[in-house]
Image: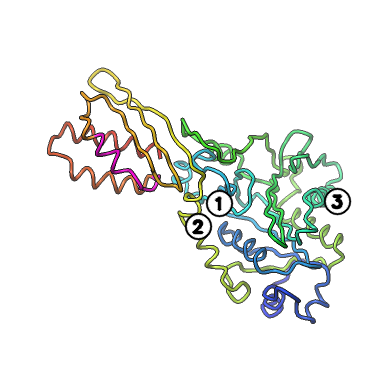
Amino acid sequence: MLIPFSIKNCFQFLCNRQVPAAGLKDTVKNGLILQSISNDVYQNLAVEDWIHDHMNLEGNPILFLWRNSPSVVIGRHQNPWQECNLNLMREEGIKLARRRSGGGTVYHDMGNINLTFFTTKSKYDRMKNLKLIVRALKAVQPQLDVQPTKRFDLLLDGQFKISGTASKIGRTTAYHHCTLLCSTDGTFLSSLLKSPYQGIRSNATASIPSLVKNLLEKDPTLTCEVLMNAIAAEYAAYHGIDNHINLINPADETLFPGINSKARELQAWEWIYGKTPKFSINTSFNVLDGQSHLEIKVHIDIKNGRIQVCNIEAPHHWLPLEVCDKLNSSYIDSKFCPIETTTLTNILLRTCPGDHELYCKWNILCEKMKGIM
């Protein structure tokens, strides 16, 4: 059953790190189930941060249920250029987020359920949580063949991944979060989680591709609402608490003081792209010169999302060396992104000599560079 979370009680429970208010403690004895009314990935990830940073979870574990509008979420130590199709995401208006936990890249939409299990560090147990989900699924559909793996995934029929796991372990608190594919857009999932970029060398954590399947394909009655209610019921039974899903607004500062600042940090370029581990790109592209094609070689080193080294090599007869050198030096310390490259390109083109042929070549080269980013 869904009930709005009382602002007064929620504030008392969530804001007191040490001991929850006595009245609420008598009501919520062993745990709490929360569900976000927001579908914004940054707001929902901010809830995770807020609970992890501010909650005293001793004797009060929390299950947090949330769904997002279409978005791609990468792990803390991943490279977005390596993990997803950024150009397609820009075209389709798909958000990119970097979470605080490790693990691989996932696609979220309203057909995907996110579950976050908050506990003290000493009670952290991913397998226990996955088995709880399995029990909930089988309570709804006993014929389902769903099993957890050693990698803490959930497999349907022994081969299709329906859930992936990631976690964050703090000094005293921890959380394990996982996905559950119900009716996700499989076409978007496969196309967005496929990087078109070539020649990337990186030590960032790489995702492991898997066959996936929606639970709704197995049984059309397994909707997101049915599954969330089943998991909440199993969680409540396991912890001996009332089976209430408490609705929360992640943007409400009266419930979560300072949470909007956390959401802004999560959507900042410096966090999403700037936290990418150092990487390099070695690639090339062809340009047309009369009836023949010329190869342009490119080497770029990127640190903290900014270009540290840029070396564009073009045949001297096609583009003078001093022009290439000017372009190379201009890119240094700029963000490795098409928006900044476009701005930089426009500035550079205005300084180009009034030679129409040279201008066209420089413009072609700049456009190709934007394609790399």
Dots 1 and 2: beta carbons under 8 Å? no
- Vertical side of 281 occupied by 101: above or below: below
- Residue 155 pos. (x, y %): 76, 39
Magenta residue check for 90: no
What is the image's colouring? rainbow
Q: Which residues are magenta?
A: 324-337
The reply, left or right, for residue 258 in relation to residue 87 is right
Viewer-nearest residue: 221 or 21? 21
Q: Residue at x 31, y 45 (%)?
A: 342
Name the image quarter holding the N terminus: bottom right
Q: Quadrant of residue 3?
A: bottom right
Q: Which residue is mark 2?
A: 267
First of labels 1, 2 by sequence position: 1
Name the residue rendered at 55%, 38% in the picture: 203
Amino acid, disc 1:
Arg
* Mark 3 or 2, closer to the camera: 2
User: Which residue type does callout 3 highlight?
Assistant: Ala
Evaluate if marks 3 and 2 touch, with contact meaning CB atoms under 8 Å apart. no
Residue 152 x %, y % = 75, 43
Query: Spatial distance from mark 1 to mark 3, Cα to Cα?
Result: 34 Å
Q: Is residue 348 above or below residue 57?
A: above
Circle 1 residues within 10 Å: few <14, some 14–19, many ≥20: many
- Residue 53 vs 126, above or below: the answer is below
- The residue tagged with tag 2: helix, strand or loop? loop
User: Is label 1 in contact with label 3 (beta carbons under 8 Å)?
Assistant: no
Crowdedness near tag 2: few (<14), some (14–19) or many (≥20) residues, C-alpha within 10 Å = some
Whole-percent x, y for residue 222 in the image: 75, 48
Amino acid type at mark 2: Gln
Of the 4 image quadrants, the one containing the C terminus is top left
User: Residue 139 — which label?
Assistant: 3
